[in-house]
Amino acid sequence: MLITRRLEFDAGHRIPNHNSQCRHLHGHRYAIEITLSGQIIATEGASEQGMVMDFTEVKSIAQEVVVNQWDHAFLAYRGDAEVVAFLATLPGHKTVVLDVVPTAENLAAVAFQLLDAAYIDRYANQLRLEQVRLYETPNNWADARR
């Protein structure tokens, strides 16, 4: 069985070598969908009976591991030294420095890596992260799959 939880967050980024507008500092209303697989829990009387995982717990873990870290932050590429240095001059600015250019594809892959260990078999029902879909806009997204 597959289940999916969607969350949204706002963040800024830039693609330093892009040939178009994305080379400029800008932001997006991102959405992230976390898809998990597992067996439906059949334990009589369990709070999660009939579920793969409680959607509230899926949300809580995703917020802790990714969303709260990235929400209202500037996602900067370590190799974009001038921007990283500039952001460091802003007192209290929330900056996340990444080892990859913050494209939708790379952000989906990073989010998958961060979330993968967080969901491993929490209910002994063979729970496993299958996919992270990251929407950069409503019409553009990237999927990181197992």
Image (cartoon, grey):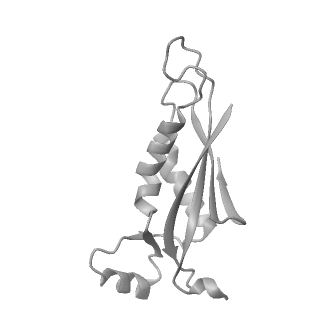
Give the residue displayed 57% in from the left and 32% down from the top. Answer: 127
Give the residue displayed 50% in from the left and 26% down from the top. Answer: 123
**Viewer-proximal residue among 72 and 82:** 72
Q: Residue furthest right?
A: 139
Residue 96, picture quadrant: bottom left
Residue 5 lies, with reference to residue 139, above or below; the image says: above
Residue 141 lies, with reference to residue 41, above or below; the image says: below
Q: Residue 47, position in %: x, y? A: 48, 21
Give the residue displayed 56% in from the left and 67% down from the top. Answer: 29
Q: Residue 45, position in %: x, y? A: 50, 12
Report the side of 30 relative to 92 (left or right): right
Residue 61, picture quadrant: top left
Q: Residue 126, position in %: x, y? A: 58, 28
Q: Residue 138, position in %: x, y? A: 68, 64
Q: Residue furthest left?
A: 91
The quadrant in which the N terminus is found is top right
Count of all numbered marks drawn on residues in the image: 0
Residue 133, picture quadrant: bottom right
Give the residue displayed 59% in from the left and 16% down from the top. Answer: 42
Residue 116 lies, with reference to residue 98, above or below; the image says: above
Q: Residue furthest top?
A: 44
